[in-house]
Amino acid sequence: MQSTFTGDSDVSKSMAVIACTAMAILYVAILYAPTLILCLPPSDSFQSYMIRRFICAAISSVFSLIACSLILPIQWGKSHVSSIYGIRLDHIWQAVVFPLALTSLMYAGTLILNLLLLLDSGQEDRENGRSLSLDSIKNLVHGFIEPISSMASNIQAWRNYLVAPLTEELVFRACMIPLLLCGGFSTYTVVFLCPIFFSLAHLNHLLEQAQRSGSWLKALTIVGFQVGYTVIFGSYASFLFVRTGHLTAPLVAHIFCNYLGLPVIISRRTGMVTVASVAGLLGFIWLLFPLTSPHLYNAKTDNCMCWHRYCSWS
């Protein structure tokens, strides 16, 4: 199936905002549809509970993709419809390697801390009269890659490293950003506005946290921190999508961040972690625009469509 942007946007700002809000609400609300709407019995296991959520998230994503294609001013038959959403195979290695390298700079402290743990393991072996044990290295490496290797049997790993990143990037980047750009919002406005919708999808954790902890104040504190983090990451992911026109870029960054969690900035054991974190942050700022240069991800920048906008943001 093929399509292209007609060139004359029929999307108003209000329509774009309403559509994005509806998509964010749907992404969360549909998770409760099996029990509240379909009246299905509660899941008998955590795995069946998560599978239900996976199906709901997939339905929400497909619905958002279809709705987005109907709202956007598309002329069918001239280019691949997938390019609207940044779903492309060209420049795929650039879309994986460069964003991954850039994102890893923010985790310089975390990576240094993991390296120090490896060295400590070797030091402990030497103090016990043993050479650096291959088993200790294998154990550390195993602990590093186990969350990924366990995906086949760990339903939580499927959620963290596949379903959540993929569906969230499809809805909150691939669908919403084209709508907001075509609605007439400026590029920087979109980068900072889109994460607000992204954060709305995490407010459902407020009730869950309140029920779990028994305290609304504690729940507000926890969820407030989560929302703040998602806004920061959402801005970065939106930046990657607009700069590259490639959905793979924010997707690999999303998976990487879910894998490592929050970056380690300060460690009591050594100041090297803090130094590495600061150096990584400076490197991130220095390389942010060069490593996301539109020319790295696109063969040409003339006649670019509104949802890419890389032709006017170099």
Image (cartoon, rainbow, N blue to C red):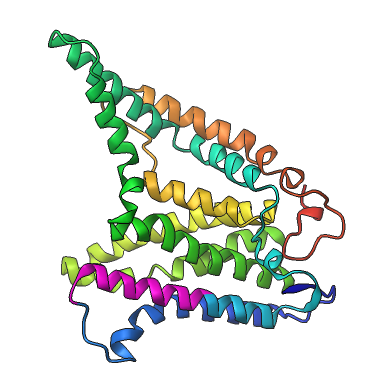
The answer to whether any part of residue 37 appears in the image is yes
Image location (x, y in percent) of residue 229: 43, 54
The question of residue 109 being in magenta is answered with no
Left/right placement of residue 25 relative to residue 219 reads right
Magenta span covers which residues? 44-61
Q: Nearer the viewer, residue 163 or 273?
A: 163
Residue drawn where x is 87% and y is 55% of the image: 302
Task: Tell me which secondary structure the magenta stretch mostly adopts.
Answer: helix
The answer to whether any part of residue 225 appears in the image is no
Left/right placement of residue 192 relative to residue 217 reads right
Furthest residue in direction right, as rendered: 302
Left/right placement of residue 31 relative to residue 91 reads left
Q: Quadrant of residue 152?
A: bottom left
Q: Is residue 170 above or below residue 287?
A: below
Image location (x, y in percent) of residue 213: 17, 65
Q: Is residue 124 above or below residue 155?
A: above
